[in-house]
Amino acid sequence: MKLGKRLIALLLVLGVMFCLTACKKAEAPTEKQAKETEATTKTEQPEKKILVGFSQMDNNEAWRVTETEDLKAVAEERGYDFAYTDAQSQIAKQLSDIEDLVAQGVDYLVIAPKENTGLERGLEAAKEAGIPVILIDRCHEGVAGEDYATFIASDFVYQGYECGVALAEAMGGSGNVVIIEGQPGGTDGVERQEGFDKAMEEYPNISILASQPGEYSRSKAQSVMENYLQSYGNTINGVFSYDDEMAQGAITAIEAYGLKPGEDIKITGIDGQKSAIQAIIDGKMTAAVVTCSPRFGTIVFDTIERMIAGESVETHIQLGDYVIDSTNAEVELENGF
């Protein structure tokens, strides 16, 4: 009987010890262990970065290079992956580039269109894939908020108008003007000309002698200006250039012809390049430069982050441009590109 009781007691002790051991093994991990487990899980399953694609229309002149580099820099700074293509001023290649970016599975697509038509199929592919499209600098045909999410750009009409007024005032309200246009088909050029024409309505004693495209190329604009000088000589009193790069080409041609830019022939441009601002300081561009910044990085990624947060985004976001002339050129020089 005593032996039986001892056996039962022994079995009870062994049972308790087994339970205690099992419970100890089943205890929750320590804080250190939990952190180590969490870190291991994160290592094994890294968070996927958001991929932003950018279709650049061309990347062979200062404004476009600055635009591309600024987007790249802000993407890296904020931790986004960035895929970039250069259409080399070919609308067919830009369409193909956009389709490739959609096929890559970009999360957001930024496009600087070469022209305002020709990319419809690419926009439709992005739409079908559920990829929000942000147009920058130039617009494209389509319905804002449906075919693309938003359009971010300067007020091109304002730019053209302010250039027209500045040029007319520098010419004393009368004389002859030649125009160096950009690339045919771009909304920027169409609207800049619209603004310039509005300004000319206020100056009936100014005549337009000729208008030809310089295609936003310094060398091409120089050639165009040389042809103008051969045709019209010193009857030319002013030059309206759609951008600063071409204005520099015009200056070179005028100097080679033996005239003084800024004195014999007044010149105005658009963008805010350092070289153009310096030309104002040097008196070679007596008329104004209207800013058109290529630094889209901050506003583009601010817009993307608003979309990520589920906020509604305006279908047209307008940048703030302003006039640079002899009164503020020295201060603005450091802001040029």
Image (cartoon, rainbow, N blue to C red):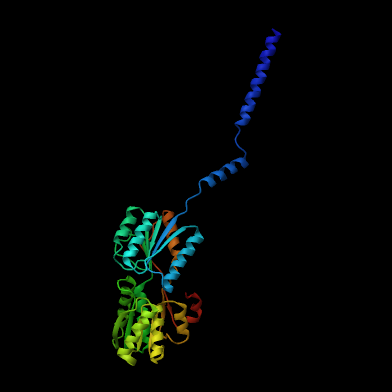
**Residue 8 as seen in the image, left or right of residue 218:** right
Quarter placement of the N terminus: top right
Question: Picture quarter containing residue 163?
Answer: bottom left
Picture layout, residue 152 above or below residue 235:
above
Image spot of residue 212 (x, y percent): 30, 80
- Seen at 49% across and 75% down, the residue is 335
Question: Picture quarter containing residue 127?
Answer: bottom left
Picture layout, residue 217 above or below residue 3:
below
Could you tell me if residue 132 is visible in this image?
A: no
Q: Which residue is farthest right?
A: 2
Could you tell me if residue 128 is visible in this image?
A: yes
- Seen at 47% across and 51% down, the residue is 48
**Residue 288 as seen in the image, left or right of residue 125:** right
Image spot of residue 140 (x, y percent): 31, 65
Camera-side residue: 317 or 63? 63
- Seen at 64% across and 24% down, the residue is 18
Image spot of residue 237 (x, y percent): 35, 89
Image spot of residue 332 (x, y percent): 49, 78
Picture layout, residue 277 above or below residue 318:
below
- Seen at 35% across and 69% down, the residue is 89
Image mark count: 0
Question: Picture quarter containing residue 162?
Answer: bottom left
